[in-house]
Amino acid sequence: MVDPKELSNENETDEEPKWDYTTSRDAQITGAVVIGANFLVLILFLLYKYVPAVHLFISGKPM
């Protein structure tokens, strides 16, 4: 059987995975930009669908 102290020593020398960017400030900014863009698309769609003037401005055709 393996000594538990040897296992813990092996884990301490391992590097963290390079794909773990969960605490990165850049990832938070990117996520905020994506969410903001989604809200913008949602607002534009709702305005296009329910406000005749916006529909006319975007498509050039009346509802």
Image (spheres, helix red, strand yellow):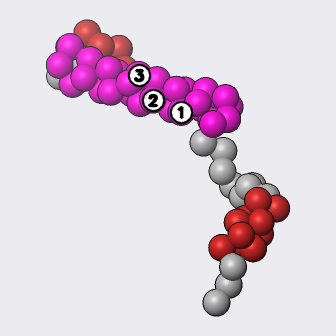
Q: Residue furthest bottom?
A: 1
Q: Is residue 4 left or right of residue 48?
A: right
Could you give the CA–CA distance between mark 3 and mark 2, rounded to whole angstroms? Answer: 9 Å
Residue 62 in sight: yes
Instruction: Give the residue at mark 1.
Output: 31
The amino acid type of the residue labelled 3 equals Leu
Mark 1 crowd level (few <14, some 14–19, many ≥20, 10 Å Cα)? few
Could you give the CA–CA distance between mark 2 and mark 1, rounded to whole angstroms? Answer: 6 Å
Checking the image for residue 2, the label placed there is none
Residue at horizontal 52%, vertical 26%? 32
The amino acid type of the residue labelled 2 equals Ile
> Where does the image place residue 30, in percent across and percent down from the top left?
60, 32
Q: Main secondary structure of the magenta part?
A: helix
Q: Quadrant of residue 29?
A: top right
Q: Is residue 25 left or right of residue 44?
A: right
Residue at horizontal 34%, vertical 21%? 44
Q: Quadrant of residue 24?
A: top right
The amino acid type of the residue labelled 1 equals Gly
